[in-house]
Amino acid sequence: MAAVQGGMSDADIETDIKTEPSTDGFGNNNANDGRVLSASPGSGSSTGSNKQTAAVTPEDQQTLLAVLQFLKKNKLIESVEILRREAGLPENSLDPKATESAGAGSGGAAGIVDLEGGDVSSLLSRVTGSSSAGAQAPTKAVAEDQPDVRVVLSAYSQQGDPTLYEVYYSDLKKFIETVLDCHRAELSQVFYPLFVHMYLELVYNNHESEAKAFFEKFSGDQECYYEEDLRVLSGLTKKEHMRGNETLLDFRTSKFVLRISRDSYQLLKRHLQERQNNQIWNIIQEHLYIDIFDGMPRSKSQIDAMSGSLAGEAKREANKTKVYYGLLKEPEIELPLDDEDEEAENEEGKPKKKKPKKDSMGSKSKKQDPNAPSQNRIPLPELKDSDKLDKIMYMKEATKRIRLGSDNLPSVCFYTFLNAYQGLTAVDFTDDSSLIAGGFADSTVRVWSVTPKKLRKVKSAADLNLIDKESDDVLERIMDEKTASESKIMYGHSGPVYGISFSPDRNYLLSSSEDGTVRLWSLLTFTCLVAYKGHNYPVWDTQFSPYGYYFVSGGHDRVARLWATDHYQPLRIFSGHLADITCTRFHPNSNYVATGSSDRTIRVWDVLSGNCVRIFTGHKGPIHSLAFSPNGKFLASGATDGRVLLWDIGHGLMMGELKGHTDTIYSLRFSRDGEILASGSMDNTVRLWDVMKAFDDLETDDFTAATGHIHLQDNSQELLLGTYTTKSTPVIHLHFTRRNLLLAAGVSQL
Amino acid sequence: MSAMAEERRQKHCSVVLPTESMKAMAESVGVGQLQEDSCVALSEEVSYRIKEIAQDALKFMHHGKRRKLTTSDIDNALKLKNVEPLYGFQSQEFIPFRFASGGGRELHFYEEKEVDLSDIINTPLPRVPLDVSLKAHWLSIEGMQPAIPENPPPATKEQQKVESTEPLKVVKPGQEEEGTIQGKGQGTTTPDGKGQCLEKGLIRLKPRSTHELSVEQQLYYKEITEACVGSCEAKRAEALQSIATDPGLYQMLPRFSTFISEGVRVNVVQNNLALLIYLMRMVKALMDNPTLYLEKYLHELIPAVVTCIVSKQLCLRPDVDNHWALRDFAARLMAQSCKTFSTTTNNIQSRITKTFTKSWLDDKTQWTTRYGCIAGLAELGPDVIKTLIIPRLAIEGARIKAVMEGPVISNIDKIGAEHVQSLLLKHCASVIAKLRSPPDNVEQYRTEYGYLGPMLCSHVMKARTQAALQAQQVNRTTLTITQPRPTLSVSQSGLSGSSGPRTPSIIKVPSSLTLMSPRPGTPSQPSPPATKYIVMATSAGAASTQQVILAQSLSHILDLHIGMIMCQI
């Protein structure tokens, strides 16, 4: 999509990314044909070219393919044949690799592969065949000047009588309405994808009025959560519009996934075969991926809970990979004894409490959590002395932490940004809650100190030379008192700053912006250190790893990137989302990254391999906030649909649905013990939820983990512990201090 | 899906720019003759592209954490498509598109003025805007939301309404904390409470309607009421401003209501005009407050207002004091409350109309009351004037004639008759001007309306010329201004700042009260002025002595109130 938008100019950067959805599609195809799908979807591609094990290196292949395409374009069929034979590319083996490496040019090639099903006549032979046939057919003539989209769209060229479409569709509708109740909900799932594909076929074949009539007749039947997509679709009334339309390409390149029980599927199949309804049967065969399971058909509410994403539900295999969601062992740091003595004098209860706690910590670290990744699964930075001091501070604060629960709610302190006429777009707090950073629509990044300690810069190089470097307070001496102020402004971006994140050691700040860059700022000098370029399109979010050093960013180019602060190029590219990546979060153990997207799915990626290990569907709108629970087991997500969904990462299951908000949820945060979830929304409220109860309630039920069909109770009202309304200030950030005080931030709309 | 959504969707589907727009745009870039077919093709293509850009722009709006789409979002969306953004649209608030029509075409255009650079350079720099700053407050303290100005008022208007209209409310387990006014402790989901609920299922309860006032609120109430009826006009203005804007007055509303109705009762007996005016201004301020749900207290407020309209005597010296102004003001208040609160169930408007008409029809009614009735009816709008007042003009004219031309019985009656006459002329002229077609014949008027006929005729003619003048003005203005300028003081609205001091004997009535004016009045216009001034003819000395008396009577009421408050606590 990005390549289509940007024209040819940035094709080179985008190539490896662009092909991704198509690879996914190919994977689907494989599975459909009954071949063994060894790796999870997206596995081959996500780490880019260096992971590929093809006989021919990708670069070579790419050039080869380019040459082949040039030849065939000029109708030098013989040369094509010869070259192909010489390169040792058998026809069948060519296409998967070709699709991967051919870049924008053949991005749509997967489409062919897709629709041709199992017995793929290769990309080449197909194209050669068509051109040798004389290129007389009108569709092919049009296609000549638009090679990439042509291939995708040509899937629609085969066709029946346009006037019969309505008949076909209503026939199926009638059938599904008359089947047994238990099957109806399941079979109703096919309506939406069928509707879209039939409409697109009509549009593609220039039956404009029929398409319009079809749309008007049946669009009202579709589930309300597809309304956004239908709106996009409704604007698309001409064949010319289909070129470069993102939604369309998404629909074509990835098969719509449905989960249907075997009984229901047989019912549908029999009906269609009896009626000789080939039109619909073809679409089901070619554009839909039906994940058949054995057992009871699902109920309407179960289906509704999981559907809503751009490309249907996640396949069951997609969530089968083992995820090491446990926490890493904390490094053992001795608490300074004198402190403990001091406190023992003050309060008698204290040391007793502390002792067992420390013991439990110790025992935990001895026994490795079976769900935790090994300590060095990904290399983490060494702890510095200052980090150790901070850890000690943290542990001390932790002892003073308030234990939250349904009868012990946190206090909420709200930071309102005043006079922010330019528009506040992102906020972050440091972990110790001493600094607040704000990203603004006027491209500035501002940092405030909320403690009496003011912000100071380091002295200039000349002045630093004069300092006694051996003195104990050298860290204090390097600071320039003259620069002390409560806030600092940093200039550098050239567009609204949409994402902002402090490093855990409070020395750095990351910001991502509309200008396509992620910038790293030093909080010692308050200057920009690095601008990480690569996204080219707006970067919607960025976040530091909880251990520092790594960070993740995601944006409009549908790709999340993993970076290390000392590399100017990304270490990993996570690609697979079908629309913008709107938010990114690191797992507390730093081994995984979660991304939320406008395609209404959440994906969890393995930092080590770059693979997508979880796909969560169920949201009905773009996802704007994510939060991992402190124990790493759960994920909470909030979207424009105003719902918070809870996910079990280990089992890959939806755990609960929290309804209450009426507008986009921009912020989610678990309390430090993970007992309470706070959500902040555009509807000017902060809400607190009893997530412990939500998790407990579900765990007592018997898990149908194998199928993943959970039955959610509607208990949002019971789980809602509190709603706090602001005076027309949307809540855009939330943060729990180390003592479990909730901090919220927003800009007043008054 | 509901039919509504379907409808909406179909609308999306069909929206295409009109081909005339294509022509206009083509002309603006110098393409004269555009084929109809090309126009159709172009408009479809352009509509599609615009929709595409709008979709992308929405993305930027969402990420900008706003509800309003701005021009910069569009710019960013264009940039995304590698299209050069539109320069020059930088306004945050609105896009200054203007509308023009003429020659059968309608156009919206963006006026680009030529600006002299030296003008810009020479103008003094605007004030530097305030820098971004942070302000912290407690949104909640251990589950309770403190009632501080930074937090929203504890009960919204809807909640107040629900509470007063649905006294029996279904309590579901776990929902208890939702509706209650005070940010109650979250410990409500205690096991015993829940068990109860579960046993009995849904219980219908009448919630305790408590209006406990905190010490601060009691102090506030005391200060406000004292200022409202006190002698210092500056303080009064401040107090009224506070009543009109403060969001947290809900709890005090019953007290204010009682204060007003008792105050009117006492002061009508004592004929204290100044106090009555103050109390009416309080009613006005309460009605202006957008956070209050007044419906619950109309039974106290409406009688008080009606008293001020129709009472036989409102002041000590009816021949000198301008109690007419109070009647006018109260009548306007009445009309406003009819407009806002009248529903099919309470039927305020028809009940009020009946009351007024009944006493107007009574022969024995005094001129003062007569005036009040007519004013009250006239303020209700042209329809009421047409159906109720105009048919009675002849009878009323005869009555006035009897007083004016007959033997002088009392000066007071004469003044009353004069006022009634001018009131009738004022209100009826504009309505008649619309009812009758232009040639205004004095004789015709006389036969139809009797004694008042000739005067009406001249008033109607005046009204016509004015209307014509305005029409011209309106025609001229449509070309230039159709969009109101945005207010710049956006951030100030939350502050309950003090308004400027007002002169003691003038009540300023905003133009919004003159419900009948059919067009937006501009200050330069001679007839219905934008603001009305009611000049009170009380001399300063007299007023102060009255106030002393009043202060006593009021302090009595105050004591009563505070006593009540204490009892409740």
Image (cartoon, coloured by chain):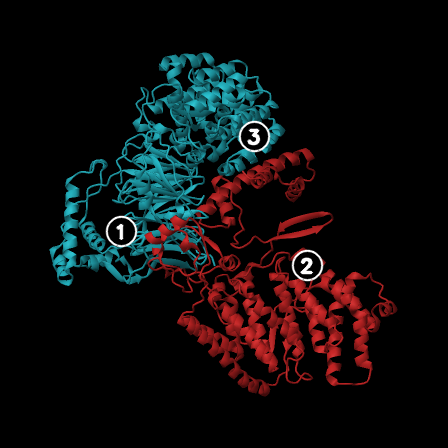
Chain colours: A cyan, B red
Q: Which amino acid does label 1 sit on?
A: Asn
Q: In this view, does A490 lie to the left or right of B395?
A: left
Query: Mark 1 Cα within 10 Å, few/some/many (few <14, many 20+)?
Result: few
Name the amino acid type tagged 3: Glu
**Spot occupied by residue B507 in the image (x, y as percentages of width and height):** 60, 75
- Quote the CA–CA distance across marks 3 and 2: 44 Å
Q: How crowded is mark 3: few (under 14 residues within 10 Å), some or many (20 or more)?
A: few
Residue A597, compared with residue A182, is above or below; it is below
Residue A426 appears in view: no
Task: Say whether residue A739 is left or right of residue B395.
Answer: left
Helix, strand or loop status at disc 3: helix
**Which residue is denoted by mark 3 in the rendering?**
A240
Which corner quadrant of the image does residue B393 belong to?
bottom right
Q: Is mark 1 on a helix, strand or loop?
A: loop
Quickly name the residue at label 1: A507
For disc 2, the chain is B
Where, by quadrant of the figure, is residue B324 drawn? Answer: bottom right
